[in-house]
Image (cartoon, grey):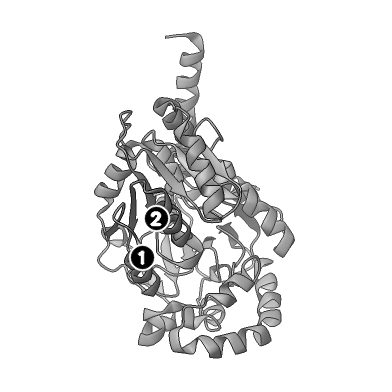
Amino acid sequence: MRPSQVSKKLSITWEFFYFFILLNMSIKNKRVAIVCDWIKDWWWAELVLKQMMEVFPQADIYTSVFLQQENTVFKWRKVTCSFIQKIPILKKSHKLALTLRPQAFESFNLNSYDVVISSSSAESKWVITKPDCLQICYCHTPTRYFWSHYEEYLSMMEFGLLNPVWKFIMPRLIKKLRKWDYAAAQRSDYFIANSINTQKRIKKYYNRKSDVIYPSIDISEFPLIEKKQEYYLAVGRCIPYKKFDLLVETFNENGKKLIIATNTDNTLYRKLKKISKENIEWKMNLPRTEIIDLYAKAKCFVFPPEEDFWLVPVEAQATGTPVIAYGVWWALETVIDQKTGVFFKKQTPQSLQKAINRFETMSFDAKKIRKHAEKFDTKIFKSQLLGFVTDKLDS
């Protein structure tokens, strides 16, 4: 073993020794609460929540709506829901509770806690704590439908027959909602951003400084497979901003095999599936193991949306699979152009096809792609989060 390898191994060993020392000394006797916007599906924000729960095994959970009662992750956990949980139509469609969620989070009594951490892309940071409580917001993004993507959300509302009503109401409420959201963002003692892009938005919309701690995946779950099969892959919810329509249009034209794995059976899904040609295969509600297998064997993972954070391109790279991504925001922090993937500049079939053509002429080293993904391993996230909280407690 070379000296540099020995040094690196010792560094990793000390990191995790320090991790557990901090846990026992500074956190053990503290009452901790983790607050999240809602717990409905099981996607990447929920994986971040799971990792937070592992860092703080004594933490209680607070949320507006909880629909994961059968998930063993929450076994033995105290989960407190807001009054929205008791209203069937709002429980089923939490988006309808937009104007009620601020009140819901402010209604929680958190006076018994020493540390409150909100995992927030919406209103969970609105909670109110006692003066000597350490309140930290782990921010996935400033509330998108108030700030950066207000116009987009307004144009693609998913309230069915109520769409005209919300389109009438929202422009009349948005100024007040932004003022409230800004004021609520001042309640946290500290902000953690999930990316550099999010860090910039936190500063722009909330005028708050933040530290970046990247969300993570458990690298050990993902097998490295160097011999790939001849298909492209996309994974995610079939909703407008994920841009599956762009994928269908592009691959309908080029005839290359594309597999799209989703869990969203809605009007858009049925429309896109109907117009998809035979080279496009849709897979619904696959178990996690099968999605990982698709990652590992795919020729390339295609990532077309604008995302603040979404761990699927990291998961794909963990299996040694390169990524074609829309070159903005989260993609710029997780994909290295021409080394672990290729970027396209515009969300158009022409721009995406140019990137596919360029990708087809290149070769990629699966081991190097995997090595890059290891920077986002869950051990690093847990160590950094615990270190951050402990440091702020000590100070």
Mark 2 or 1, nearer chain start: 2
Residue that mark 1 sits on: 275
Kindly check if marks 2 and 1 are in contact, taking CB atoms under 8 A apart as contact: yes
Tally of marks: 2
Q: If the image is split into quadrants, where does the N terminus sit?
A: top left
Residue for point 47% across, 78% down: 158
Residue that mark 2 sits on: 252
Checking the image for residue 206, the label placed there is none
| Image coordinates for residue 217, horizontal then vertical, percent | 41, 44
Density class for disc 1 (Cα within 10 Å; few <14, some 14-19, many ≥20) is few
Vertical relation: 161 (above or below) 207: below
Residue for point 38% across, 53% down: 235
Amino acid type at mark 1: Ile
Amino acid type at mark 2: Asn
Vertical relation: 3 (above or below) 130: above
Residue 386 visible in this rendered orientation of the protein = no
The answer to which of 173 and 85 lies nearer the viewer is: 173
Density class for disc 2 (Cα within 10 Å; few <14, some 14-19, many ≥20) is some
Left or right of 231: which side holds 18?
A: right
Hey, which quadrant is residue 348 in on the image?
A: bottom right
Considering every residue shown, the one lying at the far top of the view is: 2
Q: What distance separates the C-alpha of mark 2 from that of mark 1?
A: 9 Å
Left or right of 174: which side holds 255?
A: left
Vertical relation: 296 (above or below) 193: above
Residue for point 28% across, 51% down: 288
| Image coordinates for residue 23, horizontal then vertical, percent | 46, 44
